[in-house]
Amino acid sequence: MTETEIRKAIFDALHRIAPEADPQKIRPDETLREALDIDSFDFLSVLIALHERLGVEIPEADYGQLTTLSALVQYLSRKLEASPGKVG
Amino acid sequence: MPSLGADMTEGTLVQWNVKPGDSVKRGDIIAVVGTEKADIEVEVYQTGMVEKLIAQPGDKLPVGAPLALIRIEGKVSTVAEGPAAKPAPGPTPRVHASPMARKLAQELGIDLAQIRGTGPAGVIERHDVEAAKAAGVPSPPSPPTAPAETHAPSGPLRAADGMRHAIALAMARSNREIPHYYLSTQIDMSKSLRWLETFNQGRTIENRLLPAALLLKATARGLVQVPELNGFWIDDQLKISSEVHLGVAISLRGGGLMIPAILSAQAKSVEELMAALGDLITRARAGRLRSSEITEGTITVTNLGDLGVETVYGVIYPPQVALVGFGKIMERPWAEQGMLGVKPLLTATLAADHRATDGHRGAQFLQALDHLLQEPEKL
């Protein structure tokens, strides 16, 4: 899966939580939760959506690493390289 | 028209889910009613048969006005019977849409305010949203960056800001009528967080718990120990509820908040409370709450820890008599038996009605909360 596809999966998940926001405008190093004003429940929902779509396991211990868009993209890229997961 | 809020005076019937001749049982959702804050699914409290629909979609009616007649074993009863309240002038009403239309609009990112509804009295229906999507209706605007309080005090309310108006009425009434007292305590969350970590390790992501679930469970158990904080102040006396219906303050993406309740929280496990919380948040934000969830909360819990807030000084939602606030769990220096260490600490706050309880009882509740969170495995 390409980085563009991963980014699209993230944007789709974020759009479901914050439909009024434009994820394209989020800077890569911006804190996602602050940028989109999403709480811990919303953030968990985003991770669940990514898990369901990409088939990637995200241990709770890793949540703290996933604060920005670039960190999330890199994390998912690494996970998918190690285990290709789902497609689409 | 049921009363769906402390200061609701009128509502608009958005749609009927039943027709004359239909059988209904207690708990069935029979209609959707629009209030200043949201569209709410109205449940029926009797089992019987729909005799007649009195109100029509689009009708704006005072609280207490009958919506329908239900025949109960030969007897006819009205839905939302009660004394009619005097309608009060308010701000521009919110957009009325069926729950399906509201959900679809949210999924498609379409601004409901831009759509002209073709349903009864202009109610927006699913096909209106689909047509708007085809026509390229824009997404709703981003929420304002400046808070509403920056408006000139004497100026008019912003258009369609019924939510703010409803909150203003309830909170002004609270500060006017309720003699609040506040207590707070710091709780060592080490044991609770360790327990959560172990619990979550063995579970898939969708079955994991957030700390909020433990806090809700501890609150419900604490209220069983100190029931005077769980109930209502009505007719100059405290009416304690035997069930703990935990009202959860949920912020909405467009601004404002709703306080739907997790019913009978004292009887739910931590896992059930987590599932109930997720369901409530999802439905609150999609505009699909039920009337019982709006009206039956016996206490409010608000958690602003996600935004970095340390201590919450809440305003009680009348006629409730208490509000529990949770701040952020933060690592802090903590001295114990002469030794200084670092612990994850949570500040729990109680706002309580001094007519109903004294500080001593309030302190006992916070003490119970602390003790319960030191033994999370027993929650």
Image (tube, rainbow, N blue to C red):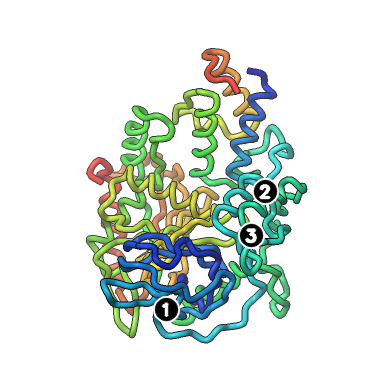
Query: Which residue in the structure is indicated by mark 3?
Result: B124
Are the residues tagged 2 and 3 within 8 Å (C-beta)? Answer: no
- Name which of mark 3 and mark 1 comes first in the sequence: 3
| Residue B200 at x, y percent in the picture | 37, 32
Secondary structure beneath label 1: loop
Secondary structure beneath label 2: helix
- Name which of mark 2 and mark 3 comes first in the sequence: 3
Residue type at mark 3? Ile
As drawn, the residue found furthest toward the front would be: B21
Secondary structure beneath label 3: loop
What residue is drawn where x is 36% and y is 50%? B215
- A69 to the left or right of B269: right
Residue type at mark 2? Glu
What residue is drawn where x is 38% and y is 35%? B207
Are the residues tagged 2 and 1 within 8 Å (C-beta)? Answer: no
Q: Quadrant of the N terminus of chain A?
A: top right
Name the subunit of mark 2: B
**Relative height, residue A84 to residue B91 (above, below):** above
Cα distance in 3D space between marks 2 and 1: 47 Å
Query: Which residue in the structure is indicated by mark 1?
Result: B178
Query: Which residue in the structure is indicated by mark 2?
Result: B130
What residue is drawn where x is 71% and y is 76%? B156
In this rendering, does residue B2 appear at all? Answer: no
Cα distance in 3D space between marks 3 and 1: 39 Å
Seen from the viewer's position, the closer of residues B308 and B323 is B323
- B82 to the left or right of B75: right
Name the subunit of mark 3: B
**Relative height, residue B182 to residue B10 (above, below):** above
